[in-house]
């Protein structure tokens, strides 16, 4: 268990990192600049992280963990209501963290591909997929890729529509595949 001071320090480092990342590329940020912005000493930074890329990876891991937690919480294959709830939750989460997603996508364009990989693993690990054909496995991968393709287009403002509409459309598309 992480104590509150450690959690607070790590949060300050991540927030300072993200603030600076809005105006500078990651390879232009210095540990001194980040430490000053986070109001910590350089030594304190190194107690928690090896370098700036370690901070970036920690921010990504947090994002992935929250998405996996959502997936696990809603068990999307149990009922269509669960699938709708997951779709609503993920689109709301992405909308709420739009700036963070876009910022991280500027640093590492494949962040959404990593999220797709995580969801692919979750889908194929689900017990209702344990005895399915190769075709059905590919269908599941197609569904995940399509869903994240739409979310990426919406995130990058290629689709100018409110989050409720995106969520509803995604749910309607997913229901066409009878994911129950």
Image: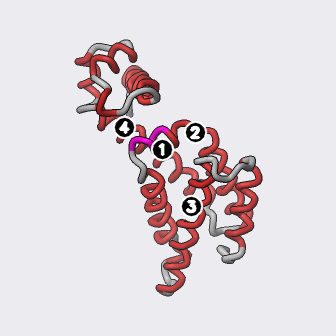
Q: Secondary structure at mark 1?
A: helix
The residue positioned 72% from the left and 67% from the top of the image is 80
Residue 105 drawn in magenta: yes
Boundaries of the magenta span: 103-107
Front-most of residues 22 and 98 = 22
The residues tagged by marks 2 and 4 sit, at their Cα atoms, a distance apart of 16 Å
Mark 4 or mark 3: which comes first in sequence?
A: 4
The residues tagged by marks 2 and 1 sit, at their Cα atoms, a distance apart of 10 Å
Q: Secondary structure at mark 3?
A: helix
CB of mark 2 within 8 Å of CB of mark 1? Answer: yes
Q: Position of residue 19 (x, y in %)?
A: 46, 25
The residue positioned 75% from the left and 58% from the top of the image is 168
Q: Secondary structure at mark 4?
A: helix
Q: Position of residue 37 (x, y in %)?
A: 39, 16
Mark 2 or mark 1: which comes first in sequence?
A: 1
Q: Which residue matches tag 1? A: 63
Within 10 Å of disc 1 (Cα), the crowding (few <14, some 14-19, many 20+) is: some
Front-most of residues 154 and 83 = 154
* Mark identifier at residue 149: 3
């Amino acid at each position: 268990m992480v104590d509150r001071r450690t959690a607070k320090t790590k949060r300050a480092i991540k927030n300072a990192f993200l603030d600076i990342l809005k105006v500078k590329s990651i390879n232009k940020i210095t540990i001194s600049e980040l430490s000053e912005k986070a109001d910590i000493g350089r030594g304190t930074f190194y107690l928690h992280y090896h370098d700036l890329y370690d901070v970036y990876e920690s921010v990504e891991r947090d994002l992935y963990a929250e998405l996996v937690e959502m997936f696990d919480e809603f068990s999307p294959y149990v009922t269509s209501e669960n699938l709708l709830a997951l779709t609503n939750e993920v689109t709301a989460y992405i909308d709420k963290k739009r700036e963070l997603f876009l910022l991280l996508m500027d640093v590492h364009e494949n962040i959404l591909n990593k999220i797709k990989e995580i969801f692919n693993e979750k889908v194929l690990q689900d017990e209702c997929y344990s005895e399915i054909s190769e075709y059905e496995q590919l269908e599941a991968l197609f569904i995940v890729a399509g869903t994240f393709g739409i979310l990426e287009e919406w995130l990058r403002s290629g689709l100018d529509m409110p989050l409720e509409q995106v969520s509803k459309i995604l749910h309607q598309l997913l229901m066409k595949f009878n994911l129950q």
